[in-house]
Image (tube, grey):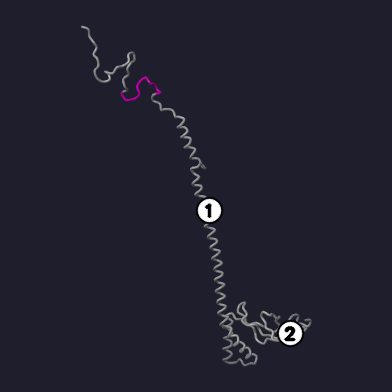
Amino acid sequence: MTDRPDEPTTGAEAQDLPEGEPTAAPSPEGGPAEGFGEAAGEAPAQTDVEEQVAGDAVAGDEPGTPEERPQDDEQSSLRNAIADLTNDLQRLQAEYANYRKRVDRDRQLVAETAAYKALTPVVEVLDTIDRAKEHGELEGGFKAVADQLERVVTAAGLVRFGEPGDAFDPTLHEALSHLGTDPEVEVTTVKHVAKGGYRLGERVVRAAQVLVVDPADA
């Protein structure tokens, strides 16, 4: 009897294999099969598309790229906003300074007006005191009261003016009469004071009532 080789019935041995080609057993460690060479274990080379993508990513990191422009615009907007706020603050400070000046000026004007109204009637009393001094009647207790009154009105800012020999000033003097000419004067001059003048600050409470003389060549 002729012996026949056993035919595989199951597993990989049952698969039809092309004649003339050797079979290779799989690698025990699951590695690449023998016969594919060293190229089988190498990573695939980088494609042109991948190189382009990598180049774009690197280019995007450079300064001045479109990705950084929004940040620059935001910083520029912040600088402009700060400059506008600074200008507004400076304008408000200037307006407030002007407001303070107006308030101080108005407050001073109100105070001067009140003092003017209060001191105007006192001027007639001061005229009486002056006449008493001229006649030597200012003595005793009356003199003490007169001196105290003069100190009070002086402290309030009331100033007396008008003396013989002053150059005549129509804003300060009221000429009651002209006494002729005087060769010793070069301009119209106060010769005699009938009533002294008073002013409060720059405001004339009452003009001095005077008698004047004119220069000889007038």
Overall secondary structure of the magenta section: loop
Pointer 1: what residue? 80
> Is residue 78 rendered to the left or right of residue 139?
left
Q: Amino acid at mark 2?
A: Val
| Element class at badge 2 | strand
Residue 29, percent across and down? Answer: 32, 25
Q: Using the numbered discs, state the Cα–Cα distance from disc 1 to disc 2 in whole angstroms.
A: 73 Å
Q: Earlier in the sequence, mark 1 or mark 2?
A: 1
Q: Quadrant of the N terminus?
A: top left
Count of numbered labels shown in the rendering:
2
Q: Amino acid at mark 1?
A: Asn
Looking at this view, is 14 or 141 the one in front? 14
Residue 119, percent across and down? Answer: 57, 83
Pointer 2: what residue? 213
Q: Magenta stretch containing residue 204, yes or no? A: no
Q: Which residues are magenta?
A: 28-39
Q: Magenta stretch containing residue 35, yes or no? A: yes
Vertical comparison of 139 with 197: above or below: below
Crowd band around label 1 with a 10 angstrom C-alpha radius: few (<14), some (14–19), many (20+): few
**Quadrant position of residue 171:** bottom right
* Disc sitting over residue 17 in the figure: none
| CB within 8 Å, label 1 to label 2 | no
Vertical comparison of 34 with 1: above or below: below
| Element class at badge 1 | helix
Q: Residue at x 32, y 13 (%)?
A: 19
Q: Residue at x 38, y 21 (%)?
A: 36
Q: Residue furthest top?
A: 1
Badge nearest the viewer, 1 or 2 = 1
Residue 61, percent across and down? Answer: 48, 40
Crowd band around label 2 with a 10 angstrom C-alpha radius: few (<14), some (14–19), many (20+): many
Looking at this view, is 79 or 30 the one in front? 79
Residue 127, percent across and down? Answer: 62, 88
